[in-house]
Image: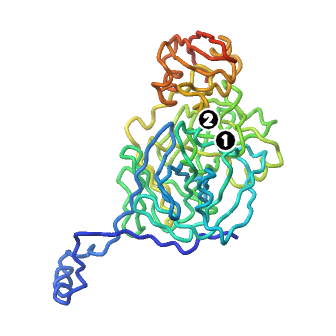
Amino acid sequence: MLKFICVNFTRSFTGHINAFSHPRLHLLCALLASVGFCRKAHAQAPLLIPFEYENDFIIVRATVNQGFPVELLFDTGSEYTLITEPSLFGLLNQNQVEPVRLVGSDMASAVTGVLSRRNRLRVGDLDIAGQPIIAVASEFLDLTQMVGRDVYGIMGIGAFGAYVLEINYARRFISLTPPAQFKPTRKALAVPLVTKSNKPYVYLDTQVHPEYRDSLLYLVDSGAALEAMIYAKATESTLYPPQVIAGSIGHGLGGSLIGFVGRTDSMHLSGLTLTGVVTHFQVAGDSLLRDSIATRNGVIGNRLLSRFDVAIDFPSHTLYLTPRRKARRPLSYDRSGLKVVDDATSFGAARVQFVSPGTPASEAGVLAGDLIRKVNGWPVRLLTTEDLQRRLRAKVGRRITLSLDRDGRSVRCTFTLRELI
């Protein structure tokens, strides 16, 4: 069994007097402590990790061993840290390495990598020694395409089990707090937490539609840019909501994820009910799916989690969710039928990865592989991937004209947005 060892959290504090470094100060602090002072003279401050939030992904800046800072995707759904940039592989400890086999996100493919032990990882206030890091070729996991900017790996959370891990989406920081110093907010919802392989899971009462209601086990996954995902067998047609669209529902380790997207009627989170939750239903072969369902039934990702201030209290086995403004409001979803990704090979364009059949974009003649140069006259080079996606889920009735490159030819396609789920 692989274990995280030699964990060493350090933080330097300046400008503070050590009350125990001088006998007189020691006596003074002892006297003041009796009336409530100096009790926290040696309390460990939370360790802070700032992050950026783009396309519903959390991105942190980290340093591996003696290398330069690189951007990693922060992933509570991953036990291990992964590096996907070949130029960084040489920075890993080469003295203790072994091959590893990973199951792809599509649950149908195997991905090979190399596990390197005893590495040093620095991110924000955090300095961790003895870290195992897995090197995986970018051909198996193109994070830059997924996120829309250069990202060179995934930061896992295997070393954080002794802390309360808080994610503040509004202020863009992660904090690690010793359990004795953590106090949940008065408005926080307390959801029982299950920990498996150092990863957080919760059971949520889920009603997909009136004929399907169950308590499902979800991985709490900050590496997923979605609200919720439920795993389904290919023959399990009674699971899906009445209105769904089919096709590519995302991209992960090993390739594209195939399935359906619809809205789940409700999810219950310890006193708060979310309605109309955009849910991805991932379809996979029975053999691999059986192993995955034994571990979990699905995933809740950033588009749901970011409605809250999140605190994962590993020691007390509790997930605390403090609702933010409009936490109960259902989120909008794409109204075009397009799945678009950043295209690193063509400056100033986004690539159409998938077109769902029977949708406005499909009916207008947009094809997978098309390069989008302009949207309603706006050059795509002036837009982030998030800006482009926001335009594709604008109000029902909005007309969209795409200027496309297709096999060296210029093509224009116009369609009208409508509700798809």
Tell me if 175 is positioned left or right of 120 in this view. left
Q: Residues within 10 Å of mark 2 (few under 14, many from 20)?
A: many
Name the kind of residue labelled 1 in the image: Ile
Describe the element under mark 1 as helix, strand or loop. strand
Tell me if 3 is positioned left or right of 315 in this view. right
Counting from the top left corner in percent of width and height, residue 339 is at 62, 27
Counting from the top left corner in percent of width and height, residue 303 is at 51, 39
Viewer-side residue, 24 vs 36: 24
Residue at figure coordinates x 43%, y 61% from the top left: 176
Quadrant position of the C terminus in the picture = top right
Q: Earlier in the sequence, mark 2 or mark 1?
A: 1
In this figure, which residue is indicated by the disc labeled 2?
279
Tell me if 109 is positioned left or right of 174 in this view. right
**Alpha carbons under labels 2 and 1: distance apart:** 7 Å
Check if mark 2's residue and mark 1's residue have beta carbons within 8 Å: yes
Viewer-side residue, 264 vs 231: 231
Name the kind of residue labelled 2 in the image: Thr
How many marks on residues?
A: 2
Identify whether 243 is placed above or below 364: below
Does residue 189 appear in this view? no
- Residue 416 appears in which quarter of the rendering? top right
In this figure, which residue is indicated by the disc labeled 1?
230
Does residue 249 appear in this view? yes
Tell me if 207 is positioned left or right of 399 in this view. right
